[in-house]
Amino acid sequence: MNETVKLAILGAVLLMLLTIAVASTVYAADSLTLDQAIEQALANNPGLKAADAQVEAAQAGVLKSRSAFLPKLNLSETWSRTDSPLMVLGTKLNREIVSPSDFDPAVMNNPEPMSNYNTRLSAVQPVWNGGKEYLGSRQAGLAREAAEQDRNRTRQETVFNVIKGYYGVLLAREYRRVAVQSHETSVENLRLADARFKAGAVLQSDLLRAKVQEAEIREMKTRAESGEKLAMANLNFAMGLSQQKEFEIAGSLEVKEGSVDLGGMTTEALSLRPDLLSLNRNRKNAETSVSQAKTDFIPSLNLMGQVDWNSDRVAGDDAKSWAVMAVLQWNLFDGLVTTANVKQASAQAGRMRAMEEQMKSAVELQVKQAFYNLQASRDRIAATSSSVQEAEEGLRIVQKRYEVGMTTLVDVLGAENALVRARTNALQALYDNNVADAELKLAVGML
């Protein structure tokens, strides 16, 4: 073998090794653990991003409420032209250009049209408005806290959906494996039936039954393969990723024991659940609205000041004047509008108190349901695990008996179906156990 051929072979081997290494790297990059799936969701889920935006909006509301304590400054430029006797004389006074001739009755009653540019800088400082500014700031703070708790709950629900979707992929993968195993068994039973039919030991009806069974199991395998793809699509949706994304899911379904202290978990739920805490802040906000409405019964005091420049040109400063005012205002009667607002706010506060009590009961019920579902799933796992072993042994015995003509194909197919049910029931029980554990954590607010 010459050197050229050796080099060509060596190059081909190196290229193959490089291809395998790159493929292995890509494959490893596409593997996905549950923690990684949760991280992807927290970074990409649109619902969580919307909740973040709501928190930002609530924070802006806090900033807006604080502005009520600060003075308001305004700068304006106003142009006017008039032949109104009163306004013309006032404009001349403001511009400090009044002369004795301006008091001639003929001139005063029929003045020439006059233009004016007024530049005004004004300020208003709230002094006392019955505590309206403070109450508004408190309400904005409560609204922000409620939005933060809503965001926390959205995060927990997002994590739960990812966990459920992840376990769904694991379940679908195991279903596919069961379907493949069942199809192999069905093919073997069809082979036995065909052999015995050719030997004249059974009727053609047995062979046809075996073929029908094999076709049904093959269809189950096809459905299982499609179900795995759909489960992966659901997980991508929960993570906020493209439906075209594909991962190799790591891990497997394992038995979750969970807590045995129902009372303690219920107490934790009432103190931890973000949606319950959010409703609590909304209830306090509604109660604050009652006090806010009552401030309209109280007198208000504000300081006002302004500086004016009047001229015959834009932003001119021909004449300057200033004024300072203290404005005391008291709503003596507004047609019962304030009274109605107070009653409306009181009714809304009562509604929020009732909703909070109802939600507390709902949280307790959710914790109890999730707790007992987790307990029941553990019992089902124990029962289905033994059923699988018994069904496998039963099928093995029936197949042996069929091979020697001691039983019928109906018994074989029945044992095969029993094994399929036992395996799928065991998988479903394990999946329900994993989901129930996550549901309990979600119900408590610990997810």
Image: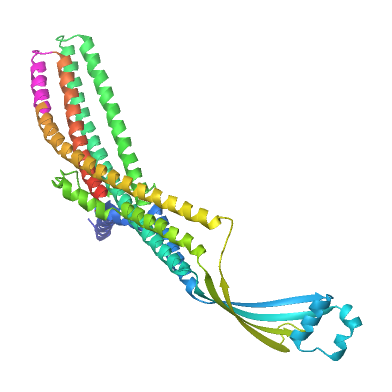
Q: The magenta stretch spans which residues?
A: 391-407
Instruction: Decide if residue 445 is in sight here.
Output: no
In the displayed structure image, the side of residue 331 where residue 196 appears, left or right: left
At 51% from the left and 63% from the top, the residue drawn is 297
Q: Position of residue 231 (x, y in %)?
A: 32, 41
Direction from residue 140 to residue 265 in the image, left or right: left
Q: Which residue is nearer to you in this view: 317 or 228?
A: 317
Q: Is residue 188 one of those drawn in magenta?
A: no
Q: Quadrant of residue 210?
A: top left
Which x, y percent locates residue 416? 17, 23
**Left or right, residue 291 beside residue 193:** right
Q: 335 or 134: nearer the eye?
A: 335
The extreme right residue here reads 106
Residue 71 % position (x, y): 53, 77
Q: Does 178 sit above or below residue 309?
A: above
| The image quarter in which residue 135 lies | bottom left
Give the camera-side residue of 365 and 125: 125
Closer-to-camera residue (155/113): 113
Q: Quadrant of residue 43?
A: bottom left
Q: Residue furthest front?
A: 332
Residue depicted at 43% across the width and 63% down the height: 140
Q: Is residue 293 visible?
A: yes
- Residue at the spot x=14%, y=36% of the render? 381
Q: How is the image coloured?
A: rainbow
Q: Position of residue 29 (x, y in %)?
A: 28, 56
